[in-house]
Image (cartoon, helix red, strand yellow):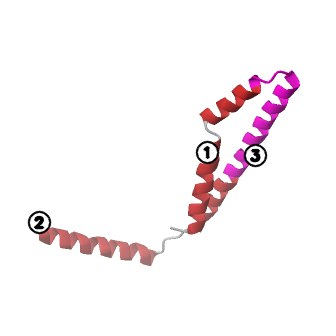
Amino acid sequence: MDPYMVQLGAKFFEIAGKQSYDVISKKMKVAKEKAKAEEQQNAYEDIISELMRDNRELENIAGEYKRHYDNLTISDEDIEHLQNTLNSVTDILIDFL
C-alpha cells in the first residue's frame, strides 16, 4: 500500500478520535462548569473553532483520497491478465476436485 495513503488514513483516524462524542461531551461539560458567562462563551467558541478546523482538515483528506482514486486506472491488459490468472487458478482447483 502507498505510504502516503497510510499516512492520510492515520491522520483521518487521529482527527476522528479527537472529535468523538465522548471527547466533545467532556469538553462541553468543562465549559459549562466555568463560573463566568464570558469564560463559558470563550470555551464554547474554542470548541467550535477546533471542530471547524478539524472538519476542514477532514475535507482536505477526503479530497486527497479522491484525487488519488481518480488517478487510478486499470488498463485492458491488466484486466486480461487478471482474467487469465483467474482461469488458471480455476483450472488448478478443478483438477483437485
Which numbered circle lies on residue 63? Answer: none
Q: Establish if 25 lies above or below 60.
A: above
Residue 86 percent across, percent down from the top left: 29, 70
Say what amino acid the circle numbered 2 marks.
Leu
User: Magenta segment range?
Assistant: 32-59
Return the residue at label 1.
16
Which secondary structure, mark 3?
A: helix
In the rendered image, the quadrant that contains the C terminus is bottom left
Q: Earlier in the sequence, mark 1 or mark 3?
A: 1
Amino acid type of the residue tagged 3 in the rendering: Arg
Q: Mark 2, residues whose alpha carbon is within 10 Å: few (<14), some, or many (≥20)?
A: few
Q: Nearer the viewer, residue 13 or 52?
A: 13
Res. 23 visible in picture = yes
Decide which of tag 1 and tag 2 comes sooner along the chain. Answer: 1
According to the picture, the residue beneath numbered tag 3 turns out to be 53
Front-most of residues 28 and 49: 28
Q: How many marks?
A: 3
Q: Which label lies toward us, 1 or 2?
A: 1
Kindly state the secondary structure of the residue where label 1 is placed. helix
Furthest residue in direction left, as rendered:
97
Classed neighbour count for the residue bearing mark 3: other residues with Cα under 10 Å, few (<14), some (14–19), many (≥20): few
**Side (left or right) of 17 relative to 30:** left
Q: Quadrant of residue 68?
A: bottom right
Q: CA distance from mark 1 to mark 2?
A: 48 Å
Name which of mark 3 and mark 2 comes first in the sequence. 3
- Residue 55 part of the magenta-drawn span: yes
- Which residue is painted at 31% across and 74% down in the image? 85
User: Given the image, on which type of amino acid does mark 1 rest?
Assistant: Ala
Disc 2 marks which residue? 97
By secondary structure, the bulk of the magenta-drawn segment is best described as helix
